[in-house]
Image (spheres, rainbow, N blue to C red):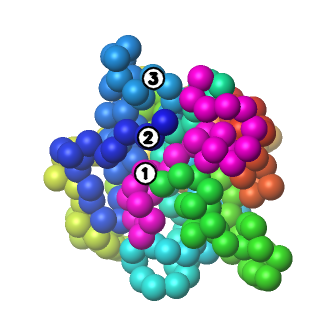
Amino acid sequence: MAAPPVPSDHIYTSCYCEENIFLLADALTRSAASEDNEVVAWDVYVVFVSNHHKSVALWEQKAREGVVLWDYHVLLVLRARTLRKMCPPGGEAAERAHAWVYDLDSRAPVPCCWQDYMHATFPYAFSDGWEVPAQYVSLFRVVPAEDYLDHFVSDRSHMLVQGQVDVYVSAPPPYSPLRGRKASDSQLKTNLMPSFVSMRSHVSDGALPSAADVAETRTYGKVLGMSEFVPWLSGELGAADK
């Protein structure tokens, strides 16, 4: 079963992958509300790609030929809810049908079958002939789309030129900064880096933080290494819960 296309009215802004994917996740989850829509066959996930060094190597990106080093990147994954209903169990057809990746900054098709996407973007994950320094190897924070739509907050301050108040490294989107549906704490200005880009698994121990600090430093989803992320895409590993 083919994955649904990117909506024709989707707004894309270069260098704001977390917002591009937020809007796409919102569109696809809204579509899933209709029982007649093909999206209902899928679970929607937002995937943050980074590591503890904030320097990950991705290939086949539109930014340039060859390899690109990002501090972080954001994808959307549709993962089949019931594979048996879509194709016979086992075999290549079942594996390829299990998940589709939406990377709006990739040279790969959008959406792209997970196998083709991973071979193009992370070739070292499948070939012993590839050697990538450990500091450039990706980790993946897999977040259920509903959690992302509920809790993501960004004031775009991470895109400001250092020392400037209103000068951006790249022009911001034409709409207001995004705020999740359940992000009610007005003191929380952004949780992009600590709650989503960070690859730590939980809030660090220490002195009791303020309520605002708790909201900002809570993490969402589950962090997977490459050896877990590929089986998760293929369906060999269960859903990445909260």
Instruction: Tell me if residue 181 comes above or below residue 175 in the rendering.
Output: above
Give how far across and how far down residue 64 sits, in percent: 42, 83
Q: Quadrant of residue 23?
A: top left
Query: Please, what secondary structure does the residue beneath circle 1 have?
Result: loop
Query: Does residue 223 appear in the picture of this structure?
Result: no
Query: Please, what secondary structure does the residue beneath circle 3 have?
Result: helix
Disc 2: CA contacts within 10 A as few (<14), some (14-19) or many (>=20): many
**C-beta proximity under 8 Å, tags 2 and 1:** yes
Which residue lies under the disc numbered 3? 40
Disc 1: CA contacts within 10 A as few (<14), some (14-19) or many (>=20): many
Disc 2 residue type (three-letter): Ala
Instruction: Tell me if residue 99 comes above or below residue 214 in the rendering.
Output: below
Give how far across and how far down residue 38 sits, in percent: 40, 27
- As for residue 88 lying within the magenta part, the answer is yes
Disc 3 residue type (three-letter): Val
Mark positioned earlier in the residue sequence (3 or 2): 2
Q: Image point 46% across, 73% down: which residue?
A: 61
> In the image, which disc is placed on residue 3?
2
Label 3, label 2: how many angstroms apart (C-alpha)?
Answer: 11 Å
Which residue lies under the disc numbered 1? 111
- As for residue 166 lying within the magenta part, the answer is no
Disc 1 residue type (three-letter): Pro
Q: Quadrant of residue 106?
A: bottom left
Instruction: Tell me if residue 2 comes above or below residue 80 in the rendering.
Output: below
Give how far across and how far down residue 145 sits, in percent: 49, 33
Label 2, label 1: how many angstroms apart (C-alpha)?
Answer: 7 Å
